[in-house]
Amino acid sequence: MADRPRLVVTRPVHEDALAMLRPRADVVVGPDDPPIPSADEVAGLIKDADICYTLAANPVTADAIKGASKLRLIASLATGFDNIDVKAAKARGIPVTFAPGILDDTTADAAFGLLIAAARRFGSAERFLRDGKYRGWTPFLFLGNDVHKATLGIIGMGRIGRAMARRSRGFEMTLLYSDARRNEDAERELGARYVTLDELLAQSDFVSVHTPLLPETRHLIDAAALRKMKRTAVLINTSRGPVVDERALAEALRDGVIAAAGLDVFEREPIVDELLLQQENALLLPHVASASENTRRRMAVRAAENILAFLDGKPLLDPVP
C-alpha cells in the first residue's frame, strides 16, 4: 500500500490506540451515538475503507464486506469475533484479528463480583437503602446465600473460566466444570472436576457461563436447563447474551425456579427483556465486565498493534483461526 490507507474505526476507542495509527493511515472514527450502530450504518462507514477497526457490538456482515471493495483487514479490539462474518472475510482473503487474553482477569473479577452480589442480594439491599426504606437492623433483612464452601459450576473452562475458577479458591469452593473438551491442566491446577452439563446444573450452587457464542451454544441455558438447577442456585453470565434464553430466565426468576441471576450481557443489547427488568432477584449490568481503564486501553492498543503489523507486512499477532 504505497498510498496512506483509509482506516475506519467504527466507534471511538482509547486515544493511545488512535495516536499509534494516525502517523500510518488516514483515520476516520465513527460517531459515539448510538454506540451500537446498525449493520447498514457499519456498511456505510467502511465501504471505502482499506482497514476496518471494529468493536465487539458493531456488526461487520457479509453484505458490509461485499460492499467494501478496497477492504484488506478487519481488526477487532474484542476477545470474541461473533460480530464479524469471518467466513465472508476469508472468502475474499481478508484477514481478521481480535484481542484475546487481555480482559480475562478483569472480566473474571466482575463475574465473581456479580456472583457475590447476586447471592447476597446486594443490589436489592442498596436500592432499599437509597429509597429511604431502611429503618434499622433486623436478623431477617435481605437474607441471601453463602458463597464460601459452596459449589461453583463453570460452563466453559477457557481463559476467563479458568480465571474465574482461580478466584473461587479463596472461598474454599468445590469446583465443577463442563466444556466441549476436557481441560486436564485446569483439573491439576485447581482441583476442578469434569462433569456433564446436566450434572453441573444439578449439583452447583452457582453456575457461571464462560462459553463463546456458537450455533451450538445459543440458548444453551434455556427453560429446560434452568429447571435442572437447584431452586437456591444463582446463574452468572458475562460471556455472550444469546447463550442464555433471556425470557426463560426471567420466567424462572419470577417463578422461583432458581434463586437469582447476575448478568452483564443480554440477547438483544441494549434492549433488555421487560420481564427480566421487573425481577428483583436479577442483578443487571450494562456490559461493563471488562470496563477497567487499564484493560480497555490495552484492548484498543492490541487491535492497533495488529493493524501496524499488517501495514508492516509482519505476521499478525492475533489472527482469527
Image (spheres, rainbow, N blue to C red):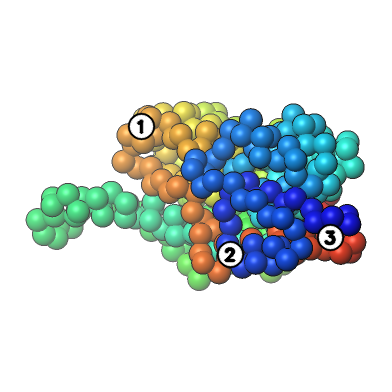
Point out the frontmost of discs 1 and 2: 2
Whole-number angstrom distance, CA of label 3 to CA of label 2: 20 Å
Q: Which amino acid is tagged 3?
A: Leu
Point out the frontmost of discs 3 and 1: 3
Q: Which amino acid is tagged 1?
A: Arg
Q: Earlier in the sequence, mark 3 or mark 1?
A: 1
Residue highlighted by disc 1:
254
Look at 54% across and 46% down and name the residue there: 31
- Decide: is 189 above or below 311: below
The image quadrant that residue 27 belongs to is bottom right
Residue highlighted by disc 3:
311
Q: Is residue 300 visible?
A: yes
Seen as rendered, the residue at the extreme front is 3
Provide residue 131's location: percent of width, then percent of height.
Answer: 17, 49
Q: Is residue 92 left or right of residue 193?
A: right
Look at 38% across and 30% down and name the residue there: 274
